[in-house]
Image (cartoon, coloured by chain):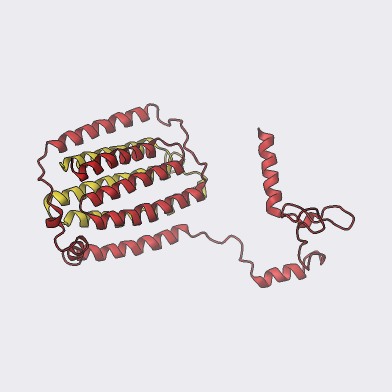
Chain colours: A yellow, B red
Amino acid sequence: MNPMNYIVLSAILFSIGAVGVLVRRNALVVFMCVELMLNAANLAFVTFARTSGTLDGQVTAFFVMVVAAAEVVVGLAIIMMIYRSRRSASVDDASLLKL
Amino acid sequence: MTGEAVAFWIVAPITVLGGIGLVASRKAVHSALWLAVTMIGLAVLYVTQDAPFLGVVQVIVYTGAVMMLFLFVIMLVGVDASDSLVETLKGQRLAAILAVSGFASLLISAVTRATIGAPVPAAELNAGGNVEGLADLIFTDYLFAFEVTSALLITAAVGALVLALTPRVAPRRSQKDQAIARFRPADGDLSQAAGLPTPGVLARHNAVGTPALLPDGSPAEASYSRVLRAREELEAAQEDEQ
């Protein structure tokens, strides 16, 4: 099967994630959309690993997963902290620095 | 049609559907469940692409750990915290969708014009085993990156601990303090020193919601759970609002 299909699927998933980041107001859902974008990139990495005949792409996808896990832990802790002080998980309410 | 193509055309629409569901659901819990669907679909696609190790890691790390973490935080933040549908910036939603569809068409048209080689057969790609091949790379060429990753993980764990830590407002009540409060109360009233009456004593039911009856037949207020009383008051207040 043509590996281009996977790349196109990856681009579509990345775009859906980007729409979510721009449109949604709930910080948790925005975060999930970021995860979707990371996953889409991973799919492209795995596909390229297959077409290039080396495993370097898979190793990169593996590192992306590790970084994403660390990012989720810290990001969710920050969301929890904001929720605790402002009683809201909306990205619109965290506008304390705005003039 | 090869088996791989069949798997792709079944799983790819499901992953896209999961992505759309993630963006379109109003409740954060539904978004999380749709994202889990997408991630499992991606795991299947990894396995069909001769990356079984990544497929398993995808299920364990993403659908297992990360999604559970998300659901846990949704539970703490409140399941009903659904998104407001009010647009803060006028026309932002439409503009975002237009901009991203432009970006997507640009990306897809650019990428499909590129020439990428035919997929290498699995026997060649994973000669000597997929996990062994990945381990070879991680512990030789990517050793430094791998070690930096461990520093990243420990930093993330400590960072989450520091961020999630709440300073104690009141000093912690030890067992000794509780015993003193019970047997040497400020008002000198020792009637509850033997413990509060259990609910349901001498009453028709022994459920926790049934207060104990006193010898004269009146309910013993102290036997009724504080939590249940607070919940009833809350429900009554909500009914008053409606």
Question: Residue A92 versus residue B106: which sits nearer the camera?
Answer: B106
Residue B138: image quadrant is bottom left
* Residue drawn at 34 percent across, 37 percent down: B17
Report whether A62 appears left or right of A28.
Answer: left
Question: Residue B193 versus residue B19: which sits nearer the camera?
Answer: B19
Q: Position of residue A79 (x, y in %)?
A: 44, 49
Q: Position of residue A95 (x, y in %)?
A: 44, 41
Residue A42 visible somewhere in the drawing: no
Report whether B131 appears left or right of B14.
Answer: left
* Residue drawn at 21 percent across, 38 percent down: A8
Residue B149: image quadrant is bottom left
* Residue drawn at 40 percent across, 30 percent down: B89
Query: Vertical placement of B101 versus B170: above or below?
Result: above
Query: Vertical placement of A19 versus B147: above or below?
Result: above
Query: Vertical placement of B98 versus B75: above or below?
Result: above
* Residue drawn at 37 percent across, 30 percent down: B93
Report whether B116 appears left or right of B11.
Answer: left
Q: Quadrant of the N terminus of chain B?
A: top left
Q: Position of residue B202 (x, y in %)?
A: 82, 58
Question: Residue B92 versus residue A28: which sits nearer the camera?
Answer: A28
Q: Quadrant of the C terminus of chain B?
A: top right
